[in-house]
Image (cartoon, helix red, strand yellow):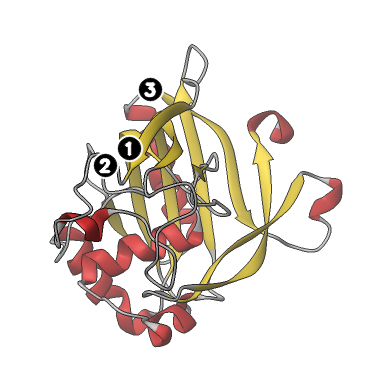
Amino acid sequence: MSNPFILLWLEAPLQSWGADSRFGRRDTLDFPTKSGLLGLLCCALGAGGEQRELLDEMAELRQTVLAFQRERGERPPLLRDFQMVGSGYNEKDKWETLLIPKKRDGGGAVGGGTKMTYRYYLQEAAFAAALEVPAARAGEFAEALKAPVWDIYFGRKCCAPTDMVFRGEFDSEVAALEAASSIAKEKRLREAFRVRDYAPGDEGEAEVVALNDVPVRFGPKKKYRQRRVTIIHHNDEE
């Protein structure tokens, strides 16, 4: 029996999907990552820790993302948020000092405890994600997404959804993507591009990129591996 697909609708004022960010600069891709969506699923399930078994089950399963934009007008530019981390805390207070960045050995950070960071967000973005899931887990995933154990968000905790995320379970990817297109049509959105798993020969048809976004383990010591994806812009299909 083939695996079903679940459809997620991702719409919010802000979204941020980082794949290769450093501490001082937190970038975002133009579309949701596999690690971000599996993290969202773990939040819905209330699944903390490394989750090696679940991630191993999901690693090779397909994921296709459709990116939408308004029928008229360009997509809003990236939002850059400037933040200070560790600023204004009393180093002599045993609780406040825990919030000040330090070196691994607990000593003072180079240049002091306060650090400047830049964080980037997509504004007013809308995506649909069709995720292949193990048949034995489909019901569990659906129930969790309809009634999440923990709050779900789109990349960062400040990126809360503004519409229902779970949009159904489907027997095929084609059916899931058709349902996504119907939702977009109701909202007067048009497809800008789609991101799907790489297939041999894609280099001559569209843009192929490598992402380090397949989680091997979550938790304090996260680990990821690469996957290749194909990005098909709307004009590429016309």
| Residue in view at x 55 percent, y 54 percent | 19
Q: Is residue 1 among the parts visible in the rendering?
A: no
Q: Which residue is mark 3?
A: 188
Q: Residue 41: x and y, percent?
A: 31, 65
Between tags 2 and 3, which lies in front? Answer: 2
Q: Which kind of residue does numbered mark 2 sit on?
A: Cys
Q: Which residue is mark 1?
A: 11
Between tags 3 and 1, which lies in front? Answer: 1
Q: Quadrant of the C terminus?
A: top right
In the rendered view, does 236 fall on the left or right side of 218? right
Q: Number of labelled discs?
A: 3
| Residue in view at x 18 percent, y 56 percent | 92
Q: Residue furthest front?
A: 92
Q: Which kind of residue does numbered mark 1 sit on?
A: Glu
Choose the circle earlier in sequence order: 3 or 1: 1
- Which residue is more in the foreground, 206 or 124? 124
| Residue in view at x 42 percent, y 54 percent | 176
Q: Which residue is mark 2?
A: 158
What is the secondary structure assignment of the residue under circle 2? Answer: loop
